[in-house]
Image (tube, helix red, strand yellow):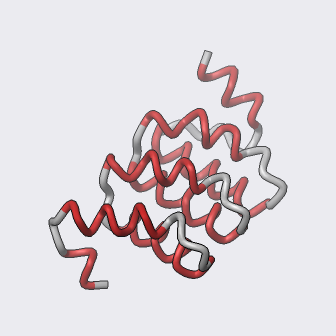
Amino acid sequence: MVLLYMKDDRVAEILFTSLKNDDVEIRRGAATILGCCPNLKAAVPLIAALRDSDTLVRQAAARSLGTVRDIGAVEPLIAALSDPDGNVRREAADALRMITAKNLGPDPAKWQKWKE
């Protein structure tokens, strides 16, 4: 956890690279850590992690995107509301609420309508 306190772009790059690691635990850990030290540069790799094959990685990515609060994550999080896993959908809805200050729940249609 010492990585959280280092203000070095190299640390962020290591975490971004770790989101592509073959080991699911490393990917999940990287997604979680990126949410503990919000960095707008983290949004793009976390958005990509919303499509990870592992449910826990997708959950961590959605949760961390809520912490990062990048408006560019809204559309991918709306898409994540259709994830087959209910926990991913819940985390995506929570992240959308954190980013937008709106509480429209887990219905993607409501979010799409709001976005228009």
**In front: 57, or 81?**
57
x, y percentage for residue 38?
32, 58
- Quadrant where the N terminus lies? bottom left
How many numbered marks does the figure carry? 0
**In front: 37, or 24?**
24
- Residue drawn at point x = 69 percent, y = 20 percent: 113
x, y percentage for residue 8?
17, 65
**In front: 99, or 13?**
13
**In front: 52, or 97?**
52
Task: Decide if residue 59 is on the left or right side of residue 39.
Answer: right
Task: Decide if residue 37 is on the left or right side of residue 47.
Answer: left
- Residue drawn at point x = 62 percent, y = 22 percent: 114
In the rendered image, the vertical position of residue 22 relative to residue 61, given as above or below: below
Q: Residue furthest left?
A: 7
In the rendered image, the vertical position of residue 32 relative to residue 25, given as above or below: above
x, y percentage for residue 30?
45, 71
- Residue drawn at point x = 41 percent, y = 56 percent: 67
